[in-house]
Image: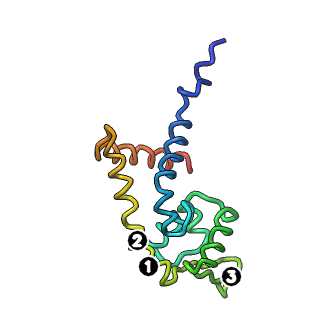
Amino acid sequence: MNNEQLRLENQLCFPVYAASRLITREYQPYFKKLGITYPQYLVFLVLWENDGMLVNAIAKKLILNTNTITPLLKRMEQQGFIVRKRLEEDERKVYIQLTPKGKDLKKEAAEIPKELSKKLMQSNLNINDLVALKETLNTMIQFLSN
């Protein structure tokens, strides 16, 4: 029986997984300098774009479960980056807002995507390749998250 479909090099999932891990590894020195983790960076990206959101909305945007994101948000609150407030009209809902410290981090983090792009441009990829890859992955994400 020939199981070509089970060979690692024939899997779509592996290069996506490996690329994600390697990109995250490239980000690590920047995150360390900022005192944050990659998942926290993702939350910051969402909040810098739209400060003041419910936990459920953040989780949905990041394609995470609320039970995954809640401990992360608690740590961010302990670090002084965000404030968590239960809504008076429905205490099950928690509203997240950036503190001044969380807002200030945006200036330092602005260099991170530029640095990764510079690194990737040292390969044989060009900006059009990267944009096309991002669009393809976004299409895949949109399809699979329905």
The quadrant in which residue 107 appears is: bottom left
Please tell me whether mark 1 sits on a helix, a strand or a loop: helix
The residue that label 3 is drawn on is: 90
Mark-to-mark CA distance, 2 and 1: 8 Å
Q: Nearer the viewer, mark 3 or mark 2?
A: 2
Please tell me whether mark 3 sits on a helix, a strand or a loop: loop
Which residue ends up furthest to the bottom in the rendered image?
Answer: 88
Q: Residue at x 34, y 58 (%)?
A: 114
The location of residue 10, given as percent across then percent down, is 53, 26
In the figure, 14 relative to 82: above or below?
above
Q: Residue at x 40, y 71 (%)?
A: 108
The residue that label 1 is drawn on is: 104
**Mark with earlier residue (3, 2):** 3
The location of residue 74, given as percent across then percent down, is 66, 74
Please tell me whether mark 2 sits on a helix, a strand or a loop: helix
Residue 108 tag number: 2
Categorize mark 1 by other alpha carbons within 10 Å: few (<14), some (14-19), many (20+): few
Categorize mark 3 by other alpha carbons within 10 Å: few (<14), some (14-19), many (20+): few
Amino acid type at circle 2 is Glu
